[in-house]
Image (tube, rainbow, N blue to C red):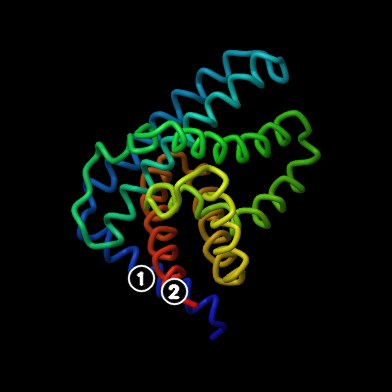
Amino acid sequence: MPSAILFLQQSLTVALDRLRASFWIALAAGAAYWLMALLLARIVTNFPRGSPAAILSILSSQGLLGILIVGLARFFLRLADGKAARLDELFYGFSAPWKSIAGALFGWVIGIVSLTALLLPAAAPIALIAVLCLLPLLMFEPFLVADDAVSGVTEAFVESFRLGISHYAKALAIAVTVAALFFLGVLLVVGLLINIPICYSLVAVAYRNLLSEP
């Protein structure tokens, strides 16, 4: 079995074990993020498609969601470490200005791809490929911030890139799985309630494992 697939299998097994031990609070954390995303999406749809107001609302929403992702990363890192997690961890991205900026920038990167797909539907396949190529290099950024492993915005992105590029095949296996689970969750709508905890727990466990590898 290829090492990347084996790594994915092992990380997913550990992630599911951690979730089983803290199922309800993990579900509550995922639900909180899901409801916030739905609320922001509702606000965005009130503006004419492609208008400056719509663009601004998308970027603002993605920035806020990016900050909340730092909190989710903090929450699921604690679960990955076998520690008790609290729902107030979800606000960790607001604990310091630079952490909020790092989270917002992460959200904006995803927002730009979403905006491209919104304004140029024909570019959606290209946007998907871009996400799958970039996600292994960027997805650890919120976890580095949440883990207090970096001390600045630039360092967060640089270290995420280094971690991803050093273990690209394994990071890609995780990224593809996360993207597939999110896509499936979007199709099922309420499926995101389950998939959000699984995805974040998976990335948290993978992050911990990759940090320990040379």
Query: Would residue 167 appear left or right of 131 to someone viewing this image?
Result: left
Residue at the (39%, 34%) spot, across then down: 96
Circle 1 Cα neighbour tier, 10 Å, few/some/many (<14 / 14–19 / ≥20):
few
Q: What residue type is disc 2 on?
A: Gln
Q: Nearer the viewer, residue 124 or 169?
A: 169
Residue highlighted by disc 2:
9
Q: Residues within 10 Å of mark 2 (few under 14, many from 20)?
A: some
Q: In which quarter of the image is the N terminus?
A: bottom right
Q: What element carries label 2?
A: helix
Judging depth in this view, the residue of 151 and 127 nearest the camera is 151
**Residue 205, quarter of picture:** bottom left
Q: Badge 1 is on which residue?
A: 13
Label 1, label 2: how many angstroms apart (C-alpha)? 6 Å
| Whether label 1 touches label 2, CB < 8 Å | yes
User: Which residue: 60% across, 58% down?
Assistant: 161
Q: Which amino acid does label 1 sit on?
A: Thr
Where does the image place residue 107, in percent across and percent down from the top left? Answer: 55, 37
In the image, residue 199 above or below residue 152: below
